[in-house]
Image (spheres, helix red, strand yellow):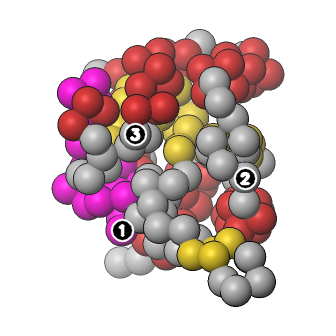
């Protein structure tokens, strides 16, 4: 199964780690809402030896802050060509694209989804994205989709029971 060889989960931000909403206050400060279950699952991935990265077409201070809080070292914002970043991640970490999983929801994620070893899409992703995904979560973006993908990945690698045992 391709999930067994995944060493890195790369995630789009808007529509994947968030529900796609962007809140701008009267002072022009942008805010995003992240899901605590997704964050907890990302920490489980790190504990299991799977590293994570974020790639966003937009730039936001809240993304930088959330990534730092979760220990996500690879944060790439303002990216037009996401495949170039995936290739760079592979070079720096001595990985093949087949060892990366990618989760995205919109048309600009299609090139990345088509290049990696495993493609995830949230339930509310564009239909065109779902067609290329190996797995579509039941949860929508920003509402546990990343947590669902992380659990699937950890189960496939035989690491889920070890994580679950910590809480039982």
* Residue ID at (56%, 38%): 10
Q: Which residue is mark 1?
A: 143
Residue 130's x, y, as percent? 24, 35
- Foreground tag (3 vs 1): 3
Q: Which residue is mark 2?
A: 59
Other residues around mark 1 within 10 Å, as few (<14) / some (14–19) / many (≥20): many
SS of the residue under disc 3: loop
Q: Quadrant of the N terminus?
A: top left
Magenta residues, as a range?
130-149
- Residue 51 in the figure: left or right of residue 165: right
| Residue 102 seen from this side | yes
* Residue ID at (26%, 53%): 124
**Of label 2 and label 1, which has the lower sequence position?**
2
Q: CA distance from mark 2 to mark 3?
A: 17 Å
- Residue 41 in the figure: left or right of residue 168: right
SS of the residue under disc 2: loop
Residue 117's x, y, as percent? 43, 20
- Tag of residue 106: 3
* Residue ID at (63%, 42%): 57
Say if mark 2 contacts mark 1, CB within 8 Å: no
């Amino acid at each position: 199964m391709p999930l067994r060889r995944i060493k890195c989960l790369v995630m789009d931000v808007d529509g994947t780690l968030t529900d796609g909403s962007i809140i701008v206050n009267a002072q022009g400060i942008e805010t995003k809402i992240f899901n605590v279950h997704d964050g907890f699952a990302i920490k489980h991935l790190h504990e299991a030896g799977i590293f994570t990265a974020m790639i966003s077409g937009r730039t936001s201070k809240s993304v930088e802050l959330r990534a730092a809080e979760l220990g996500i070292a690879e944060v790439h914002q303002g990216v037009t060509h996401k495949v170039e970043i995936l290739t760079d991640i592979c070079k720096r970490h001595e990985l093949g694209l087949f060892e990366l999983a990618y989760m995205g929801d919109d048309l600009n994620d299609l090139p990345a989804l088509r290049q990696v070893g495993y493609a995830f899409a949230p339930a509310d992703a564009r239909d065109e994205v779902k067609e290329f995904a190996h797995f579509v979560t039941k949860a929508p973006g920003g509402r546990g989709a990343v947590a669902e993908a992380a659990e699937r990945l950890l189960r496939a690698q035989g690491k889920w029971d070890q994580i679950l045992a910590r809480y039982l």
